[in-house]
């Protein structure tokens, strides 16, 4: 008697489940696993508040006066507190009061700038510490060092400028690390373009532009058609609710003169 043919294609392995948690036990071991979270490093736009005092009244008056020209721009903006200019290290209670005052002014304190007593205070306040914040222009103490013969270090090769050919749309950010940025398209309202060096924009600028992000005070901004929301060089910024008539839509350059941010039409 010959054996009957068996159709194995209809046979399926029965599902086996765990008695403890009901998970499927005979799922292939090499099945792809979905990630619950991913870690990425990137630039985050922060307003830096360099405190000269911890007096709540003085801080509130100064902040409300400075943000009155563009209240919606600063609404719920993330702020980093820089304590390096204070005459003495503040207490935890003083910084908590400052955080509350900043909140009343419409911004949210999300961390402290690195340096001084910030590390210890950040632990007490359960706040992060941010690096790469522009250091204040304090005089450097001069000490007498013994003479030494040392070869001059070789200069680091300059990186070519980052070229951005596509329009930068609202909500997008383009950052040129350790080099200049050249944008040959539109920067829309709500978009951000940033560079550690200079920023050149050969299309309409309707968003935010930041040059010298890591403290280069010689950086400049050049724009073909100026309608910016914000211009910042080495942390010194100006917000534009209304563009001055002599600058609107024309080629403009911006630069720092000390701590003053200045603007002029290109060619004048």
Image (spheres, grey):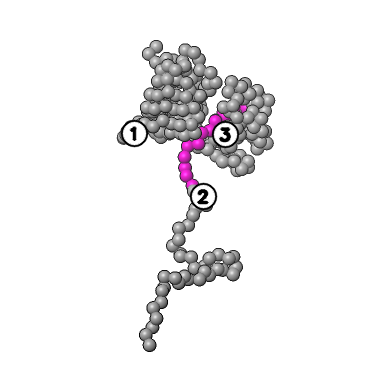
What type of secondary structure mainly makes up the magenta span?
A: loop
- Front residue of 149 and 168: 168
Give the residue number, with chain letter if any, for mark 1. Answer: 159
Q: Is residue 8 left or right of residue 57?
A: left
Give how far apart the Cα atoms at labels 1 and 2 are: 33 Å
Tag 3 secondary structure: strand
Mark closer to the chain start, 3 or 2 = 2
Give the residue number, with chain letter if any, for mark 3. Answer: 78
Tag in front: 3 or 2: 2
The residue under the point 66% across, 33% down is 100
Residue 66 painted magenta = no
Segment tinted magenta in the rendering: 39-55
Mark 1 vs 3: CB contact within 8 A: no
**Which quarter of the image is occupied by the C terminus?**
top left
- Front residue of 111 and 164: 164
Mark closer to the chain start, 1 or 3 = 3
State the count of labels. Answer: 3
The residue under the point 44% across, 62% down is 30
Mark closer to the chain start, 1 or 2 = 2
Give the residue number, with chain letter if any, for mark 2. Answer: 37
Label 1: how many residues lie within 10 Å, few (<14), some (14-19) or many (20+)?
few
Give how far apart the Cα atoms at labels 3 and 2 are: 23 Å
**Which quarter of the image is occupied by the N terminus?**
bottom left
User: Is residue 123 shown above or below 55?
Assistant: below
Residue 248 % position (x, y): 47, 16
Residue 263 % position (x, y): 46, 17
Residue 44 painted magenta = yes
Residue 26 % position (x, y): 49, 68
Label 2: how many residues lie within 10 Å, few (<14), some (14-19) or many (20+)?
few
């Amino acid at each position: 008697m010959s054996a009957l043919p068996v159709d194995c294609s209809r046979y399926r392995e029965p599902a086996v489940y765990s008695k403890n948690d009901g998970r499927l036990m005979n799922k292939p071991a090499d099945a792809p696993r979905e990630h619950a979270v991913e870690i990425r490093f990137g630039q985050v736009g922060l307003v830096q508040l360099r405190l000269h005092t911890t007096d709540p009244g003085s801080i509130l008056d100064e902040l409300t006066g400075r943000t009155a020209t563009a209240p919606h721009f600063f609404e719920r903006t993330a702020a980093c507190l820089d304590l390096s200019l204070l005459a003495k290290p503040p207490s935890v209670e003083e910084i908590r009061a400052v955080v509350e005052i900043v909140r009343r002014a419409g911004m949210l304190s999300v961390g402290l700038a690195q340096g001084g007593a910030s590390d210890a205070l950040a632990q007490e306040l359960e706040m992060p510490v941010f690096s790469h914040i522009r250091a204040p222009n304090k005089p450097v103490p001069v000490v007498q060092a013994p003479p030494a013969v040392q070869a001059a270090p070789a200069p680091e090769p300059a990186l070519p400028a980052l070229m951005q050919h596509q329009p930068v749309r609202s909500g997008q950010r383009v950052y040129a690390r350790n080099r200049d940025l050249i944008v040959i398209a539109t920067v829309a309202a709500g978009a951000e373009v940033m560079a550690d060096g200079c920023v050149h924009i050969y299309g309409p600028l309707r968003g935010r532009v930041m040059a010298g992000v890591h403290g280069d005070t010689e950086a400049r901004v050049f724009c073909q058609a100026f309608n910016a929301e914000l211009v910042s060089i080495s942390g010194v910024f100006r917000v534009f609710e209304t563009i001055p008539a002599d600058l609107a839509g024309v080629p403009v350059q911006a630069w720092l003169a000390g701590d003053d941010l200045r603007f002029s039409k290109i060619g004048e």
